[in-house]
Amino acid sequence: MGTLSEQAAEDFIAARAFSPGLPGFVGIAVDLLVDPACAPAGRRSLRHGFLDARSPRVLVVSGPPSPGLEVALRRMSDDLAASTRIVERHRLTVLPQAAATAHPDGPAHAFGTATAGIRVGLEAGLDGGGPLGLPHRWKLAHMLAPVLAAAFANSPLRHGRPAGWRSVRQALRRDLPVLPPDGDPRETWAAYVMDTPAGAGTTPRQTLRAGGRLTPADLDRHIAALRPPVAARGHLEIDAADRQPGIDWRIPATVTAVLMDDPRAAEEATAATAHLVGEPALWERAARDALTDPVLAAAARDCFLTAYAALSRQGVSRELRDAVADFTERYVYRSRCPADDILDGVAAHP
């Protein structure tokens, strides 16, 4: 296929957006924000997945699709341990927060090249209705995303000083609506891709209407560079949580996967977040206020309680359930997030 027309480009994107599948497989990707900003280039094979350099500042540990949450977590633990050894050999330090130098008003590409997050890949769902249907999962993922962003906010500093946001990373998204326009998820995704600027500042639609050329390879590169909270990459990708310190990367991966993939939890999470659709400036509030925002705090409490109950029903390990319970008690029930610990430390040592 050569140069695409506008309609052919939309059709190309929509056709590749989702591969319908019954929920069950889970993939995890964890970004490592390193200092100094000289991450080793290239791709390295790990025991299960890969380590890639997205930029001199960010390394990405990508795990494979795994049959179930606990398998995905074990594999990512193995690969993170191997990645840590590689980082140490290059005399780099992995920072415990999600941003260090990014400006909250910075260019959109800073989200991918200067900030660190945790992405969860899930099956797209089935064509049709119900809690495991693709349309429902697409909508629920969008409603959950700002709640998860608030709960896991962990980038309040720029150059070591408070930036006025609990998540500088999510501040780059502060103008986003909670939900995409109503309609078929494939068409919605195609419209988003066509109308989102590339690195040069123009959208694919603008390029075509100005008489420019656009090939499938051009679209693939454009899609790969996009970093929305919810993306269609054949599977469903949810990129809402900031990088967490230590082994707490497991918590956003666990909560996201169980709220989306457990049918009962998905229904309860939908009820807990449905009212957010009409809330103004929700992404701005998630980035700036996190769980000090009472609306986001209430939704987070309901969602984390639902997640814990689902984990208990599924019989996951006691250690993992305890980790989720500890995070919930330490942060969610107290209307706090990890960024508040960082801010407390700065206030104590001005």
Image (cartoon, grey):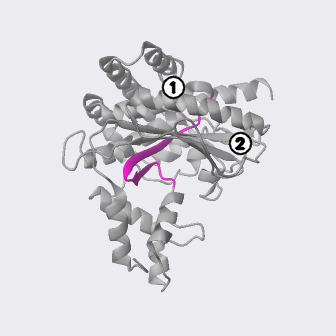
Q: Residue at x 56, y 29 (%)?
A: 78
Is residue 292 among what the camera can see?
A: no
Question: Which numbered tag is attached to residue 100?
Answer: 2
Crowd rating for badge 1 (residues with CA inside 10 Å; few <14, some 14–19, many 20+): many
Q: Find residue 66 and report its horizontal and vertical position in percent.
A: 41, 35
Q: Quadrant of residue 244?
A: top right
Q: Find residue 1 and report its horizontal and vertical position in percent.
A: 39, 76
310 to 151, vertically: above or below = above
Numbered disc 1: secondary structure = loop
Q: How many marks?
A: 2
Q: Residue at x 53, y 51 (%)?
A: 173
User: What is the three-letter code of the residue carrying label 1?
Assistant: Ser
Which residue is nearer to you in this view: 294 or 153? Answer: 153
**In the image, which residues are magenta?**
227-245
Could you give the CA–CA distance between mark 2 and mark 1, rounded to whole angstroms? 24 Å
Magenta span: helix, strand or loop, mainly? strand
Q: Report the residue marked by disc 1.
A: 335
Residue 118, magenta (yes or no): no
Which residue occupies the extreme left position in the image? 129
Residue 236, magenta (yes or no): yes
Q: Is 295 situated left or right of 163 in this image?
A: left
Q: Residue at x 81, y 29 (%)?
A: 350
13 to 165, vertically: above or below = below
Q: Find residue 230 and report its horizontal and vertical position in percent.
A: 42, 49
User: What is the three-letter code of the residue carrying label 2?
Assistant: Ala
Which residue is nearer to you in this view: 175 or 124? Answer: 124
Q: Residue at x 55, y 28 (%)?
A: 77
Crowd rating for badge 2 (residues with CA inside 10 Å; few <14, some 14–19, many 20+): many
User: Which is more foreground, mark 2 or mark 1?
Assistant: 2
Is residue 61 among what the camera can see?
A: yes
